[in-house]
């Protein structure tokens, strides 16, 4: 069996400079768990983030025993980088993980088994109201990100009136937000075999939405573009990539763009769940799958580009792959992690795109 993977609409963040290929059919099934294939358990179970104190204490003891490489005395950038990592290490060493864990658990979380993997996801919405439409949207993180990237934008999408947003065609609408952890990331299972591609992950996400009895939905995605034994190594690597993806100005340190608590949280999450080596393996497969990267997108699409990302594509380039661009926006600031830097801008662009699609449909 083969099936089309075609969501209702898609909001994208990047267009690759590759020759396009037409839409192709994807395999309908696979198995990424350990051992022989078996039938998935279709139950959807409540999930809570819960790490034992011993594990947190172990991280802090490793941080206390770690040493940063001294900066070059004649290099301002090296000194600034060293100062930032020193401050981040101090924050991580005194980090109140339980407080942040409690905050993470304020979001409704679940897990369900798909293709042999336990898939973790958030599902958040306000109670339905007669005078409002509720529209499902699937938010997909990239690398090195996670569902944590969206914690600022989720409240805006699910309760827009509270933040001064008023969009709609016949009546106002709000979103039901589903935010999964992609296979191999955080609380979703790590594939037991190599070779999982972006097409495979798209199929798993489509199966997740089907299991939730959601037939039509919008999709918003970002980039799928000494690490497992050292929490400082994990943090240092993540911060270098976050810096590359967040600003082109090398003199700007990440603590000028994000809070140290935000950066410490993502570092803890990646280390506690041993995500980094698995995510790197998966992303290596994804970025080398040129055929998939060239596939054309037929559904209505919106592209929001940030000025500080290390790549940039003109609308004319994007049109070779995205054949139905409904909205093309150049953000005024920010990089790949715009959801954390300017959540209002991201939410506004999503609302305006969905409004355009609904208006065309009506």
Image: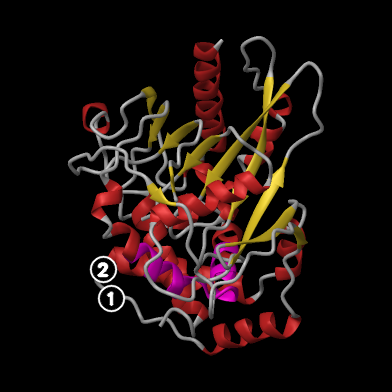
Mark 1 crowd level (few <14, some 14–19, many ≥20, 10 Å Cα): few
Judged left or right of residue 206, residue 210 is: right
In this orientation, does residue 234 appear?
yes
Which residue sits at x=58%, y=32%? 216
Q: Position of residue 188 (x, y in %)?
A: 59, 65
Report the residue at 66% width, 71% height from top: 95
Write the start and end of the magenta stretch as one range.
Answer: 265-284
Q: 309 above or below 355?
A: below
* Figure check: 11 above or below 161: below
Residue extending farthest to the front is: 1
Residue indicated by mark 1: 72
Quadrant housing the C terminus? top right
Residue 331 appears in the picture as rendered: no
The circle on residue 75 is 2
The reply to whether discs 1 and 2 touch (Cβ–Cβ < 8 Å) is yes
Left-right relation of 41 to 59: right
Q: Which x, y percent locates residue 5?
A: 45, 42
State the image coordinates of residue 58 (x, y, percent, origin top left): 64, 86
- Tell me what residue is drawn at x 44 percent, y 67 percent: 279
Secondary structure under the numbered disc 1 in the rendered image: loop
State the SS at label 2: loop
Along the line of sight, the residue nearer the viewer: 30 or 103: 30
């Amino acid at each position: 069996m083969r099936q089309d993977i075609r969501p209702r609409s898609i909001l994208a963040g990047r267009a690759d400079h590759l020759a396009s290929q037409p839409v192709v059919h994807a395999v309908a099934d696979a198995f990424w768990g350990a051992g022989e294939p078996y039938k998935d358990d279709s139950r959807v179970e409540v999930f809570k983030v819960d790490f034992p104190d011993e594990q947190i204490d172990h991280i802090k003891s490793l941080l206390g025993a770690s040493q940063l490489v001294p900066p070059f005395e004649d290099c301002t950038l090296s000194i600034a980088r060293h100062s930032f990592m020193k401050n981040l290490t101090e924050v991580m060493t005194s980090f109140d993980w339980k407080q942040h864990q409690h905050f993470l658990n304020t979001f409704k979380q679940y897990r369900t088994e798909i293709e042999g993997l336990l898939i973790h996801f958030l599902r958040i919405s306000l109670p339905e109201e007669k005078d409002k439409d509720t529209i499902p949207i699937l938010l997909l993180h990239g690398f090195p990100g996670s569902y944590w990237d969206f914690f600022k934008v989720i409240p805006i999408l699910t309760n827009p009136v509270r933040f001064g947003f008023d969009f709609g065609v016949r009546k106002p609408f709000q979103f039901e937000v589903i935010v999964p952890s992609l296979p191999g990331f955080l609380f979703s299972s790590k594939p037991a075999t190599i070779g999982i591609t972006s097409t495979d992950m798209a199929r798993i996400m489509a199966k997740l939405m089907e299991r939730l009895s959601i037939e039509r939905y919008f999709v918003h995605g970002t980039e799928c573009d000494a690490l497992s034994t050292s929490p400082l190594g994990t943090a240092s690597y993540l911060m270098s990539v976050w810096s590359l993806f967040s600003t082109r100005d090398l003199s700007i340190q990440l603590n000028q763009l994000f809070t140290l608590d935000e950066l410490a949280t993502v570092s803890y999450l990646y280390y506690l769940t041993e995500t980094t080596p698995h995510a790197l393996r998966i992303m290596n497969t994804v970025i080398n799958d040129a055929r998939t990267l060239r596939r054309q997108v037929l559904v209505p699409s919106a592209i929001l580009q940030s000025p500080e990302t290390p790549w940039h594509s003109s609308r004319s380039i994007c049109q070779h792959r995205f054949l139905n661009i409904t909205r093309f926006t150049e953000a005024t600031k920010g990089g790949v992690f715009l959801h954390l830097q300017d959540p209002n801008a991201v939410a506004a662009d999503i609302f305006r795109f969905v409004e355009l699609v609904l208006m065309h449909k009506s």
